[in-house]
């Protein structure tokens, strides 16, 4: 017998991961997001967390849901606890079509694929369309979970600026022209048109048809991510991009924000040919989404006033949004500005040039407040003057206290900047709003 020897010569460096040489090249793009790394600290009870996007589920009718879950087990347990179709439960797909109809979407249940949260749908779409080196156009800033999927499949992200009316059409045109000039393959535009995560802005209605037309002219698919669309504080529901061009828009939806995030039930509505490949991708990823969870959602939609429940969520989040905006106006120092969300979970704050929000974060946590640094929402390292503040989960009182603590940290950082000189800041494309001094 020969003794075992290492596959490669030793270099004198001790590798903590003995499997390092075995990984696929694409794993180099798999890194923990800044936000996930923050959660362990932000979840401490003494810290006011304005960082995470956890829905506030206190308004859910838990007694009713508990009884419904018992009924499902008693009446349909042998089905609910068994394997199911990768396509999803038919009754739920019918109900999803009714929900999307509120946004002007005409869909057939056969073109709906149930996923384990919309994140799975986003991952599958990226997997189906993106080869290494392909380009994805996305708003700047963009959802951190999307950036993680794009990076994992070695796609290159090109950010397009937003303003307070959402994605700027001329910026999209220019990005596509530049990509074509450079010989790059743009696979799709990824966009969150309603109550954007993290920016909080909403794509203006008059821009929607223009953006759809730009993508059609350039032969670029649109991936529309819409988890917050029913959470407008004035009850307004915006027309989905999918309603404007069914053949060129893949729509991602989720029950995580309008019902229960822990059930992890989302969906993809895709053009028919794409649907076929999505079902195959779902089979290879999970075999099938959990039937039990889907049946809970379906029973809830069939027997509960879910529209009334969403109204309660909207009122809950509007109260928290108002507390956030009021506290920002009261406490944040001059030179800061922020977006004015009309729905959803988030406010996007821009700070003076002397402040680096990523560098400031440990000092904020020491002061018992947490936020998400803007750098986590860009693929190119920008965002050091921005931060995302989430108002969805804390009480209004906790929100006000968190902003007060944050303002104290900001004042200290600005004092350091005045004493030792400003940090050179890069120009950040993103939503622009008046400063609190001019509102």
Image: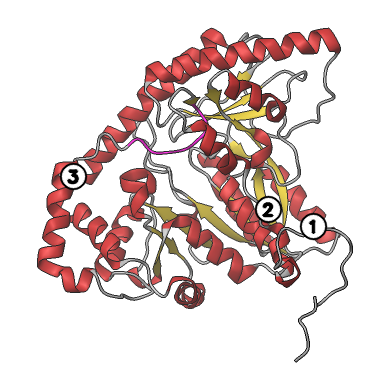
Q: What element carries label 1?
A: helix
Q: Please report the residue visible at 38 percent of the width from the left and 74 percent of the height from the top.
A: 86
Quadrant containing the N terminus is bottom right
Q: Nearer the viewer, residue 46 or 262?
A: 46
Residue 432 seen from this side = no
> Spatial distance from mark 1 to mark 2, Cα to Cα?
10 Å
Q: Is residue 29 left or right of residue 47?
A: right
Of pointers 1 and 2, the one earlier in the residue sequence: 2
Q: Does the magenta stretch include residue 361?
A: no
Classify 302 as above or below 248. above
Quadrant containing the C terminus is top right
- Binning the other alpha carbons within 10 Å of mark 2 as few (below 14), some (14 to 19) or many (20 upward) gives many
> Which residue is disc 1 drawn over?
179
> Which residue is disc 2 drawn over?
137
Q: Nearer the viewer, residue 228 or 51?
A: 51
Quarter of the figure with residue 405: top right
Magenta stretch, residue numbers: 49-56
**Number of marks in picture:** 3
């Amino acid at each position: 017998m020969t003794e075992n020897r290492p596959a490669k010569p030793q270099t004198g460096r001790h590798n903590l991961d003995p499997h390092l040489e075995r990984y696929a090249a694409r794993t180099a793009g798999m890194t923990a997001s800044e936000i996930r790394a923050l959660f362990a600290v932000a979840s401490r009870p003494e810290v006011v967390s304005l960082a995470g996007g956890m829905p506030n589920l206190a308004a859910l009718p838990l007694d009713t849901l508990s009884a419904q879950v018992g009924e499902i087990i008693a009446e349909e347990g042998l089905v609910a606890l068994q394997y199911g179709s990768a396509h999803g439960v038919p009754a739920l797909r019918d109900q999803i079509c009714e929900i999307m109809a509120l946004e002007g979407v005409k869909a057939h249940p056969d073109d709906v694929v149930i996923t384990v949260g919309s994140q799975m749908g986003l991952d599958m779409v990226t997997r189906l369309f993106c080869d290494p080196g392909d380009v994805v156009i996305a708003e700047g800033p963009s959802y951190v979970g999307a950036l993680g999927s794009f990076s994992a499949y070695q796609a290159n992200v090109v950010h397009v600026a937003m303003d307070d009316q959402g994605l700027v059409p001329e910026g999209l045109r220019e990005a596509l022209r530049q990509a074509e000039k450079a010989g790059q393959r743009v696979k799709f535009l990824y966009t969150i048109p309603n109550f954007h995560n993290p920016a909080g802005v909403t794509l203006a209605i008059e821009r929607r048809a223009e953006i759809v037309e730009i993508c059609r002219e350039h032969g670029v698919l649109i991936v529309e991510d819409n988890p917050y669309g029913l959470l407008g504080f004035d009850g307004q529901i915006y027309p989905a991009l999918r309603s404007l061009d069914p053949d060129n828009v893949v729509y991602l939806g989720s029950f995580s924000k309008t019902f229960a995030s822990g059930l992890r039930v989302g969906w993809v509505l895709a053009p028919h040919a794409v649907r076929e490949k999505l079902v195959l991708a779902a089979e290879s990823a999970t075999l099938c989404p959990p039937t039990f969870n889907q049946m809970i959602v379906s029973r809830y939609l069939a027997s509960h006033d879910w529209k009334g429940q969403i109204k309660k969520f909207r009122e809950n989040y509007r109260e928290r949004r108002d507390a956030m905006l009021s506290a920002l106006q009261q406490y944040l120092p001059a030179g800061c500005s922020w977006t004015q969300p009309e729905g959803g979970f988030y406010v996007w704050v821009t700070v003076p040039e002397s402040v680096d929000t990523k560098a400031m974060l440990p000092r904020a946590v020491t002061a018992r407040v947490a936020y998400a640094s803007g750098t986590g929402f860009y693929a190119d390292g920008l965002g050091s003057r921005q931060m995302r503040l989430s108002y969805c989960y804390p009480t209004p009182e906790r929100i006000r206290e968190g902003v007060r603590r944050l303002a104290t940290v900001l004042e200290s950082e600005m004092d350091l900047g005045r004493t030792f000189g400003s940090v050179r800041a890069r120009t950040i494309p993103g939503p622009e709003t008046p400063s609190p001094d001019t509102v």
